[in-house]
């Protein structure tokens, strides 16, 4: 078992900053794109609508030891454009990229995940003791799948058929990609 302590993340890479989100990051712009239909559908959270207070509560629920909510910021403008969430199993040294999204208009299709994922993986391998990182992507989330298909750091591992339920009751497939230290 690791003897890690909770600590926030701060990484500069390829004109982006990855850092732990804090309550003061909540603003109308963040709420607008986070609550967009496209984002909620991609995260399989249809029907959920964050208010400023519920988003602040959500941010407080991450402990920076076993779960992380990491913002992706444009380094030049300091604009929050997206995020990753990571759950870390300290005993088995496996991190799960459980959600992610690029919400800010103008950054979609700009390969932001490709520009930031290496630094994020390296951080978890070097500083958080992870030996494997797993991304679980809804098969219907084509935008997110493109971030992992043909990515040299990830290998296709499996498709979990009808693994989860959509808000409308439809069963959805999950595609698993893995990266190893």
Image (cartoon, rainbow, N blue to C red):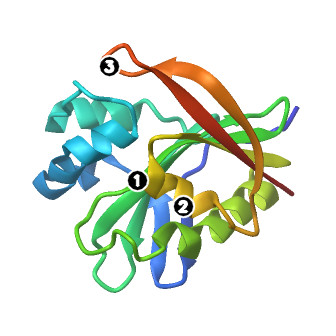
The residue tagged 3 is 167
Pointers 3 and 2 in contact (C-beta within 8 Å)? no
Q: Residue, x 65% and y 70% (percent of image)?
A: 119
User: Gap in Å between the C-alphas at discs 3 and 2?
Assistant: 24 Å
Secondary element at image label 1? strand
Residue 121 screen position, x and y as percent: 70, 60
**Is residue 9 visible in this depiction of the protein?**
no
Q: Earlier in the sequence, mark 3 or mark 2?
A: 2
Q: Mark 1 points at which residue?
A: 101
**Residue at (75% x, 65% y) in the render:** 153
Q: How crowded is mark 1: few (under 14 residues within 10 Å), some or many (20 or more)?
A: many
Q: Compared to 122, does 92 lie above or below?
A: above
Sequence-wise, the earlier of marks 2 and 1 is 1
Q: Give coordinates of residue 163: x percent, y percent.
A: 59, 21
Image quadrant where one finds the C terminus: bottom right
Is 93 on the left-hand or right-hand side of 61? Answer: right
Q: Mark 2 points at which residue?
A: 146
Could you tell which of marks 3 and 1 lies nearer the N-terminus?
Answer: 1
């Amino acid at each position: 078992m690791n003897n890690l302590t909770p600590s926030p993340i701060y990484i500069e890479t390829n004109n982006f900053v990855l850092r732990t989100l804090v309550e003061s990051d909540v603003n109308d712009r963040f709420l607008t794109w986070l609550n967009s239909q496209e984002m909620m559908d991609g995260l399989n959270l249809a029907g959920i609508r964050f208010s400023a207070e519920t988003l602040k509560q959500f941010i407080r629920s991450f402990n920076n030891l076993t779960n992380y909510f990491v913002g992706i910021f444009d380094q030049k403008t300091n604009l929050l454009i997206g995020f990753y969430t990571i759950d870390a199993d300290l005993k088995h040294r496996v991190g799960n990229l459980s959600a992610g999204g690029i919400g800010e208009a103008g950054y979609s299709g700009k390969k932001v995940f490709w520009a930031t994922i290496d630094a994020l993986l390296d951080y978890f391998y070097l500083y958080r003791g992870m030996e494997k990182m797993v991304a679980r992507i809804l098969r219907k989330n084509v935008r997110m799948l493109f971030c992992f298909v043909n990515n040299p750091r990830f290998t296709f591992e499996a498709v979990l058929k009808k693994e989860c339920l959509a808000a409308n009751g439809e069963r959805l497939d999950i595609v698993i990609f893995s990266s190893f230290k």
